[in-house]
Amino acid sequence: MVNAPTTNSLSGPLPDPTANAGYAADHPPRVGFFTDTSVCIGCKACEVACKEWNALPADGVGDHGAEGDVLGLTGMSYDNSGGLGASTYRHVAFVEQRVPAKTSVPVELGMPLSQLPGAVNPGEDREGDATEVRWLMASDVCKHCTHAACLDVCPTGALIRTEHGTVLVQDDICNGCGYCIPACPYGVIDQRKGDGGAFKCTMCQDRLGDGLMPACATACPTESIMFGNLDELRERADARLATLHGQNVPEARLYGHDPNDGVGGDGAFFLLLDEPEVYGLPPDPVVTTKDLPSMWRHAGAAALTAAGAVALAFLGARR
Ligand code: SF4
Ligand code: SF4
Ligand code: SF4
């Protein structure tokens, strides 16, 4: 049985994008990622696992690095992939910040240090008159949007909604027109040089079919990348946010988690420790095809008006 698509399919909350795409009512639950950046250690195991599983070429070398720099670091941070792209479906952002020193007691990690980073001596209040350095790390990926503009604009049907509610490019159908690239509000999808096709995270569709977790989530040693049923991940995220707020981390916030946001919520959402812009994420993304229905209505009205004017001119000329 094929479900009738629900209305309002280009923007706003959409409880079941899989059914909206025409899958039967008994389709698998929507899956996604909850990436808790507060526990990311920037090891890049996720990036490497993704490249290895998907046989993607290396970044950086020859692109960013100074001559002879085999790591190809960007020079801006401990980063050699620079951002998401056609050969980088996961990208770990490194953000170095100088922030006011906290008076909170740092967590004991069991590391052999004489002084813990950010430690405050008994009786010392450094708040307001001292700073400390912190690193924010966040593993970014395609958001597998509820309303995916990349999919809306694809003229060949290469971009599809899968039975798991994710967004997938079918390489053999993509004709390289590139329409999806400016359509993505996050700048995720990209064309590969020398190939022309559009590429992005597949949510490891080939692993999901075999009951395996995506390679990146499997490799993450801190469980910063959590994979699973999207509704359960949303509940986990709410609980984690409450925990962090209770631990005097008021700056913690969720990103892409709200079904009422401009893309109807993301299939891959995040817990951040600063504004989204700090991580290179748009603060208020909106599905770029949101206004397509009204644009088509206006275009139709304009075409009818033009046709009427031509008909009147033709009839007038015959009199
Ligand atoms: S993040 Fe971009 S590429 Fe990924 S599903 Fe959304 S619109 Fe498409
Ligand atoms: S889900 Fe698979 S394709 Fe997507 S970022 Fe993770 S490893 Fe790469
Ligand atoms: S998300 Fe996990 S695997 Fe990726 S850099 Fe952070 S800790 Fe490492």
Image (tube, rainbow, N blue to C red):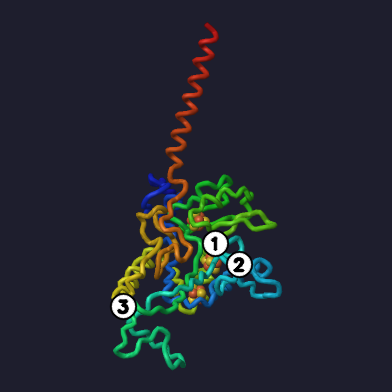
Find residue 237 and report its horizontal and vertical position in percent: 36, 69
Residue type beneath disc 2: Asn
Secondary structure type for disc 3: loop
Q: Earlier in the sequence, mark 1 or mark 2?
A: 2
Residue type beneath disc 3: Gln
Please give the name of the residue rendered at 37% of the width and 85% of the height, measured from the top-left corner: 107
Q: Earlier in the sequence, mark 3 or mark 2?
A: 2
Residue matched to label 2 = 54
Is ligand 2 within 8 Å of the beta carbon of the residue shown at mark 1?
A: yes
Q: Is residue 221 placed above or below 230 in the rendered structure?
A: below
What is the crowding at mark 3: few (fewer than 14 residues within 10 Å), some, or many (at least 20)? few
Q: Nearer the viewer, mark 3 or mark 1?
A: 3
Residue matched to label 1 = 202
Q: Is residue 107 placed above or below 275 in the rendered structure?
A: below
Is ligand 2 within 8 Å of the beta carbon of the residue shown at mark 2?
A: yes
- Do the numbered discs 1 and 2 sit on residues whose CB atoms are within 8 Å? yes
Residue matched to label 3 = 247
Front residue of 180 and 210: 180
Q: Quadrant of ligand 2?
A: bottom right
